[in-house]
Image: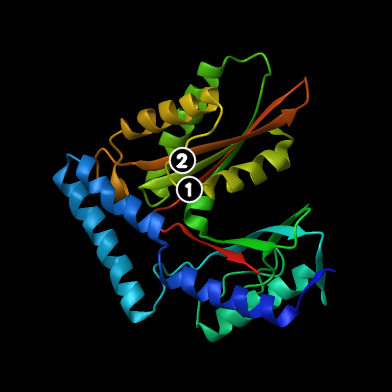
Amino acid sequence: MKKKINSIDIINAVSDACIECACILNKSTYNYIKEAINSERNETAKYVINELISNADIAKQEQIPICQDTGMVLCFVELGINIDLDKPIKDSINKGISKGYIEGYLRKSIVKDPFNRINTNDNTPGIVYIEQNETDILKINIMLKGFGSENMSFVKMLNPSILKDDVTKIISEEICKRAHNACPPIFVGIGIGGTIDFASVLSKKALLRPAGQKNADENYAEMENNILKYVNKSNIGPAGYTGDTTALSVAIEAYPTHIASLPVAVTIQCHAFRHKEIIL
């Protein structure tokens, strides 16, 4: 017998998550920023990190957004085939986004068309990716993606004959060109493989891995470590005021790809990394 999940439960869960994400940094992100002070040698950088922590504390206490850009909502859905839904999952998620942004008085930043720029007035639609599995569990990973850092993200279609060390250098150098405009310290998600579009999806999924958790493949774990070291040697620092802490975490997700290409996508996420996992 399939487990029934009503749309109203999804709507309310998504709504609550949007409001919570906008106002409360999840514990792992908060702690990661806080711990950065211990390895930071630059006094100005330490001051900036303390200001970021103070900002997060005030946002939580007063239930106001951490940042004025409350983002575009991305949802990575894991949908068990042993679940019976009474409404399409995307419809329920978008109703939840609308409810959360209206009731939470969050800034509505989504426009109906890239050129007419008319606001939808409820921050919908969100972007929803769905994967199925053989469970009776519905899992929704919600991310509120601000676009200051999103605008600094990039894609490279590289020659498949390129060496791994050269890929590491290309990614690292490109991040350093952009990081100061992305409200550092940043989190970096990297997707390698697939197609140009799927590499971008992978880069977002990489961000959802717990901060600091390395790729299980030692080759990619080494790349993550080398990119993180390179970026933190740039002396860009928190808010671009110099320092050791330009990036907090680098995560790579890889996927099979075509013999003729090597797609690489990099999503840059600012320090206000707002995300939450819902399980129903």
Q: What is the three-letter code of the residue carrying label 2?
A: Gln
At 50% across and 68% down in the image, what residue appears? 70
**Disc 2 target residue:** 213
Can you name the residue that lies furthest to the bottom here? 103
- Relative horizontal placement of residue 124, taking residue 50 as reference (left or right): right
Instruction: Give the numbered dot on residue 210.
Output: 1
6 above or below 197? Answer: below
Can you name the residue that lies furthest to the right here? 1
- Relative horizontal placement of residue 188, taking residue 63 as reference (left or right): right
- Relative horizontal placement of residue 115, taking residue 234 as reference (left or right): right
* Viewer-side residue, 255 vs 245: 255
Question: Mark 1 falls on what kind of element?
Answer: loop
Residue 136 x %, y %: 75, 62
At 19% across and 49% down in the image, what residue appears? 46
Can you name the residue that lies furthest to the left here? 43
217 above or below 13? Answer: above
Q: Residues within 10 Å of mark 2 (few under 14, many from 20)?
A: few
* Viewer-side residue, 7 vs 121: 7
* Viewer-side residue, 239 vs 119: 239
Q: CA distance from mark 2 to mark 1?
A: 6 Å
